[in-house]
């Protein structure tokens, strides 16, 4: 009877975990071009770590994550249930831990359960100093980004064979692969090593769980057989003293259902377990924050910023780096595959943020999916009309590489592909040869990069987009009377005399 009860318990918990994992993956599969953005970012809206860290760094409340208040309240009542039943990364770690053997390691590594609190403290202090590093540690972000950069290119390749979805390729996957494999590989040291020692989301929920109303508690029938202590995946139980650390407990229920004396019950217990963070640990964490924030900012080279093109609707760069959680959802929905992850173009803190690589794919005029899907509004949710007026850069022609300018041949591809009529072909006489050659009207060009993506020459395109004249505002409209007049005016570049330089 007891064995059947245990089996039912294990089955129920696995079913709940698999349900939320499948739900997360389902939302992931629905995050693509052509499908309306409705519930795809629902998990991120319930993430309290994103709410707290990004709100502090941005100096304003991230309203998109306010639903996480329900998770906070639930943790205050029931404890750290999110880690044991809902977290998709935790489920993947559980699956991996069940596959590998847990023989004692050659070198015994002591438990470092305070690590998750210290990383959480590091994130909070860094946010107050003006930099958010939440994207390196949040479990939902890590899992979403790993699926996007590592799994989605594989799936899109096979789906592309049947013309189901376009093939997606990302220029940076190695760092994400190493990062994800490292988290899984920690399971060779101990089960759920990441969750127990390093996850700041676990640290936040563990802190709240210290004040939880319901906790697992020993009763007098305990014989100190240590079964519960041995099977606890987070080592939250000390059977000798008959204490269960509510902060470490993830409510997996194993101790309650596998105890032969049924000596553990889930009941109201208002006893609060104190913290044991040492003064030296706090000072070290503070020092790390004081060093990390200026270091991350100092590695951004201003001379390289001209090559960094953000998606249309992106808020100003300083705020963008703090609000963007580097989840990769915007890159996944880009229909041209033009949105790619940064490596160090925006410094360490810009790793995995989106940039437009126009040579791979430009920004389609009739697409605004990146802003619709962004879970934190780092990319504003703009209408198609509004988005078409958001200037992200300006196209510049390199005449030394252009077929029309350098080789005296007819090439009108950039003129024909421009959706805003910002490129016009005019007669120009060079070396006694008069041909149509392309000119860019920077007043109309939005920097969409479609011209660069279609340029027929090999290697670097003869027309490139730079962040010249980019417009990035937190609120307000990109549509101005001047822009509307220029687009509606019949005075196009064709009417401007050859060689005329356009000035504002």
Image (cartoon, helix red, strand yellow):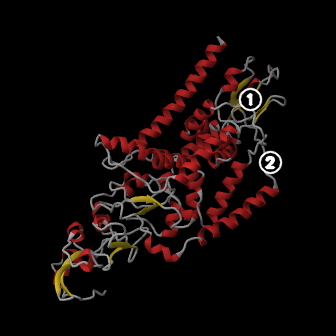
Q: Who is closer to the viewer here, 241 or 136? A: 136
Residue 64, how many percent across, how many down? 47, 53
Residue 440 appears in view:
no
Which residue is nearer to you in this view: 17 or 168? 168
- Mark carried by residue 316: none
Dot 1 or dot 2, earlier in sequence? 1
Q: Residue at x 20, y 71 (%)?
A: 412
Q: Residue at x 44, y 66 (%)?
A: 315
Q: Quadrant of the N terminus?
A: top right
Q: Secondary structure at mark 2?
A: loop
Q: Residue at x 63, y 33 (%)?
A: 97
Q: Indicate whether 100 appears above or below 150.
A: above
Mark 1 or 2, closer to the camera: 2
Label 1 sits on residue? 217
Residue 158 image point, x, y percent = 36, 41
Other residues around mark 1 within 10 Å, as few (<14) / some (14–19) / many (≥20): some
For this orientation, the residue located farthest to the top is: 1
Q: Is residue 90 left or right of residue 102?
A: left
* Quadrant in which the C terminus appears: bottom left
**Residue 92 rendering spot, x and y as whole percentages:** 56, 37
Say whether residue 385 is left or right of residue 239: left
- Residue where numbered disc 2 is placed: 276
Residue 362 percent coordinates (x, y): 33, 63
């Amino acid at each position: 009877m007891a064995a059947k009860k245990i089996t039912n318990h294990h089955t129920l918990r696995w079913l709940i975990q698999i349900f939320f994992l499948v739900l997360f993956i389902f939302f992931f599969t629905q995050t693509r071009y052509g499908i309306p953005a409705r519930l795809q970012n629902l998990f991120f809206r319930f993430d309290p770590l994103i709410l707290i860290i990004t709100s502090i760094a941005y100096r304003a409340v991230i309203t998109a994550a306010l639903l996480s208040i329900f998770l906070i309240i639930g943790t205050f009542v029931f404890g750290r249930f999110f880690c044991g039943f809902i977290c998709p990364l935790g489920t993947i770690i559980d699956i991996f831990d069940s596959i590998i053997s847990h023989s004692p390691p050659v070198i015994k590594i002591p438990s470092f359960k305070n690590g998750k609190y210290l990383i959480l403290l590091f994130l909070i202090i860094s946010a107050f100093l003006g930099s958010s590093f939440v994207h390196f540690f949040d479990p939902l972000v890590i899992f979403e980004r790993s699926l996007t950069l590592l799994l989605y290119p594989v799936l899109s390749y096979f789906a592309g064979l049947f013309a189901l979805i376009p093939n997606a390729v990302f220029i940076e996957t190695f760092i994400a692969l190493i990062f994800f494999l490292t988290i899984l590989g920690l399971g060779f040291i101990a089960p759920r090593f990441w969750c127990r020692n390093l996850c700041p989301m676990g640290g936040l929920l563990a802190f709240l769980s210290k004040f939880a109303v319901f906790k697992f508690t020993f009763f007098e029938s305990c014989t100190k057989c240590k079964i519960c202590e041995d099977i606890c995946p987070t080592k939250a139980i000390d059977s000798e003293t008959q204490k269960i650390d509510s902060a470490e407990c993830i409510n997996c229920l194993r101790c309650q259902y596998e105890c032969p004396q049924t000596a553990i019950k889930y009941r109201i217990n208002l006893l609060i377990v104190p913290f044991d963070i040492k003064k030296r640990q706090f000072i070290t964490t503070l020092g790390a924050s004081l060093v990390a924030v200026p270091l991350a900012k100092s590695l951004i080279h201003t001379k390289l910023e001209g090559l960094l093109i953000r998606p249309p609707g992106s808020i100003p760069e300083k705020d963008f780096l703090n609000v963007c959680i580097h989840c990769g959802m915007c890159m996944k929905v880009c229909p041209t595959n033009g949105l790619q992850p940064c490596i160090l173009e925006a410094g360490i803190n810009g790793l995995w943020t989106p940039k437009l690589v126009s040579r791979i794919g430009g920004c389609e005029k009739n697409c605004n999916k990146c802003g619709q899907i962004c879970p934190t509004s780092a990319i504003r949710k703009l209408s198609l009309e509004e988005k078409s007026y958001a200037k992200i850069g300006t196209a510049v022609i390199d005449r030394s590489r252009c077929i029309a300018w350098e080789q005296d041949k007819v090439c009108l591809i950039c003129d024909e592909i421009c959706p805003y009529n910002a490129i016009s072909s005019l007669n120009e006489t060079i070396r006694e040869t008069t041909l149509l050659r392309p000119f860019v009207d920077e007043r109309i060009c939005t920097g969409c990069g479609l011209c660069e993506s279609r340029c027929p020459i090999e290697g670097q395109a003869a027309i490139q987009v730079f962040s010249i004249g980019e417009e990035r505002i937190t609120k307000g409209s990109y549509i101005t009377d001047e822009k509307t007049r220029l687009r509606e005016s019949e005075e196009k570049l064709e009417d401007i005399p050859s060689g005329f330089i356009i000035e504002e």
